[in-house]
């Protein structure tokens, strides 16, 4: 924090007096969710240093250690707190690395859909007419299909066309692209609605009078005023993207078991439920539920906080 003449900087003072911080200080649920999400992010960033082993290093894996139970179950070993999976990999380490993959796909997919959807929604809302009608009809057609159905179709086609080896090597990029392209209409419709309201305001008329181009008005003046709904939608979409990846992995169209995500970990352990190795599926499933729940609750809180109708001054 910087200081000028012994007083906090303007940016810090603005944040300290903001309605955002006011709401956060009075919402225990949001504080807990933010704390949990922060701890998860720090833990995942430090995974290479805090994980007991590297699940990608074959020298650290032994089939003799497969299906060891977690520490509170008889037959566990001290070196594997949460047990091991069917391949002998330490489950805690595999979950940490898998959560990194799931979050990378979630953030990457949201980046793709937000960039594409925001650009098309901005164009449709500002230009109107034929451009608006065409883009929104395309969005309506895509929204008539579920995200999972679109992702399954595209994923199956890519896997059949390029083979399993290619799909496994570029799995993260493929899943980011598939999920991102399946969800862009959500952003397009949200941004379009905001643009339709913004372009009738006086500052847009003033920009036109000053001779600014339509491109500059869209990107420099209108877009910054549509960022609040984009931010709120992004938190929800991150959770949706993580769940979509988990569903695809469970159906065999997600990450391979050699580079697992939380979804592929759940799938790999599902076959061992009947043999009593419940922890291989249950523990990654609990981490997935907690991650999605925390992100969704933060998204709900952001939506309520950034809704002008709830502003109390």
Image: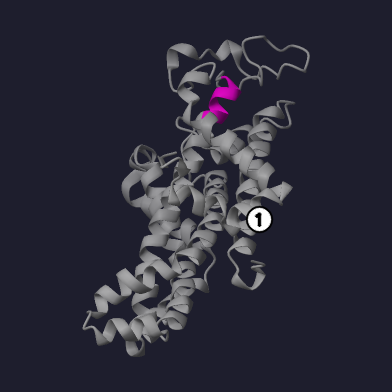
Q: Is residue 226 left or right of residue 207?
A: right
Q: Is residue 166 magenta?
A: no
Residue drawn 45% across the image and 59% down it: 153
**At x 78% / y 13%, what residue is drawn?**
74
Give me the residue at 41% from left, 40% from top. 2
Residue in view at x 44 percent, y 51 percent? 10
**What range is drawn magenta here?**
90-96
Nearer to us in this view, 227 or 244: 227
One can see residue 88 in this view: yes
**Which quadrant: the C terminus?**
bottom right
In the rendered image, residue 199, in percent from the top left (x then y), is placed at 39, 83
Work out whether residue 297 can be spotted.
no
- Magenta run includes residue 94: yes
Image vertical order of residue 258 relative to residue 191, above or below: above
For residue 163, side relative to residue 23 (left or right)? left
Locate residue 25 relative to residue 39 in the image: left or right: right
The image quarter containing residue 289 is: top right
Q: Which residue is mark 1?
A: 23
The crowd level at tag 1 (other Cα within 10 Å; few <14, some 14-19, many 20+) is some
Residue 30 in percent (x, y) is at 67, 49
Task: Find residue 279 and report its image quarter.
Answer: top right
- The number of numbered discs placed on residues in the rendered structure image is 1
Residue 299 appears left or right of 131:
right
């Amino acid at each position: 924090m910087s200081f000028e003449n012994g007083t906090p900087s303007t940016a810090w003072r603005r944040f300290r007096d903001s309605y955002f911080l006011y709401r956060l200080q009075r919402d225990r649920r949001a504080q807990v969710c933010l704390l949990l999400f922060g701890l998860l992010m720090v833990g995942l960033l430090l995974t290479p240093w805090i994980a007991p082993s590297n699940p990608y290093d074959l020298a650290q894996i032994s089939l003799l250690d497969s299906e060891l139970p977690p520490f509170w179950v008889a037959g566990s070993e001290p070196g594997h707190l949460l047990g091991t999976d069917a391949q002998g990999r330490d489950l805690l380490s595999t979950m940490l690395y898998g959560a990194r993959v799931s979050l990378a796909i979630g953030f990457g997919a949201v980046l793709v859909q937000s960039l594409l959807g925001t650009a098309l929604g901005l164009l449709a809302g500002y230009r109107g007419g034929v451009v608006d009608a065409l883009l929104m009809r395309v969005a309506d057609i895509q929204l008539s299909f579920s995200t999972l159905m679109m992702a399954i179709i595209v994923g199956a086609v890519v896997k059949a066309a390029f083979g399993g080896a290619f799909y496994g090597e570029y799995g993260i990029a493929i899943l980011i692209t598939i999920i991102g392209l399946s969800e862009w209409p959500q952003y397009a419709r949200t941004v379009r609605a905001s643009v339709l309201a913004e372009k009738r305001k006086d500052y847009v008329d003033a920009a036109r009078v000053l001779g600014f181009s339509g491109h500059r008005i869209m990107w420099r003046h209108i877009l910054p005023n549509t960022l609040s709904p984009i931010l709120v939608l992004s938190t929800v979409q991150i959770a949706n993207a993580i769940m979509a990846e988990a569903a695809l992995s469970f159906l065999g169209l997600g990450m391979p078991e050699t580079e697992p995500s939380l979804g592929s970990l759940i799938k790999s352990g599902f076959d061992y439920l009947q043999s009593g190795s419940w922890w291989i599926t249950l523990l990654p499933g609990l981490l997935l539920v907690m991650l999605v729940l925390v992100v969704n609750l933060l998204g709900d809180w952001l939506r309520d906080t950034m809704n002008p109708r709830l502003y109390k001054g």
